[in-house]
Amino acid sequence: MTELLFYHLQRAPLERVLPGLLEKSLQRGWRCAVQGPQERLRALDDVLWTYNDEAFLPHGLESDDGPAQPIVLVTHEGNPNGAAIRFLVDGAPLPADAPSYERIVLMFDGNDADAVQGARDQWKQAKELGFAATYWQQSDEGRWEKKA
């Protein structure tokens, strides 16, 4: 069954958190998809090239060579690179093919009331669809703690 994780970002922005989660996913041997709005994906594309001078995350926008990469950045449903894990950012909806993933990570900005409400709505939807969802929040030290 697909694991559905809600990540409540409070202490660090998406641009600082996502690269580490993508690294861990690749270490597990998982291909990744990141879904969000086009403007955010273009910014994340830049971040993934520059976030660490000593690391490299092979990735691409779907409109470029993304489907051939272990990490693809997409604006819509679908799984062009055969990802096992999907990251949903900036309110991206739960995809219709959600059960086909090993894990889905919904990341939301805890400092944005609309994003928090959107995540609450998606939590309710996930529960109604029968997903075993978990909720993770950043501690003061920046570690992820399971809260629900």
Image (cartoon, rainbow, N blue to C red):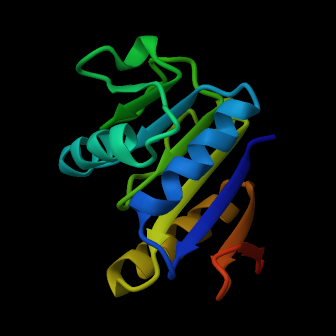
Instruction: Determine whether 142 is above or below 85 in the image.
Output: below
Which one is nearer the viewer's eye here, 84 or 64?
Answer: 64
Which one is nearer the viewer's eye here, 52 or 42?
Answer: 52
Q: How many marks?
A: 0
In which quadrant of the rendered view does residue 98 lie?
A: top right
Residue 50, percent across and down?
35, 43
Residue that protrudes farthest toward the left in the picture: 39
Residue 17, percent across and down?
52, 60
Residue displayed at 73% across by 36% down: 102
In which quadrant of the rendered view does residue 131 lie?
A: bottom right
Residue 132 horizontal side relative to residue 20, left or right: right
Residue displayed at 49% across by 71% down: 119
Instruction: Determine whether 1 is above or below 28 in the image.
Output: below
Instruction: Determine whether 90 is above or below 32 in the image.
Output: below
Residue 62, percent across and down?
31, 23
Which one is nearer the viewer's eye here, 19 or 7?
Answer: 19
Residue displayed at 81% across by 40% down: 1
Residue displayed at 76% across by 80% down: 147
Residue 63 horizontal side relative to residue 47, left or right: left
Which one is nearer the viewer's eye here, 131 or 50?
Answer: 50
Residue 8, percent across and down?
56, 74
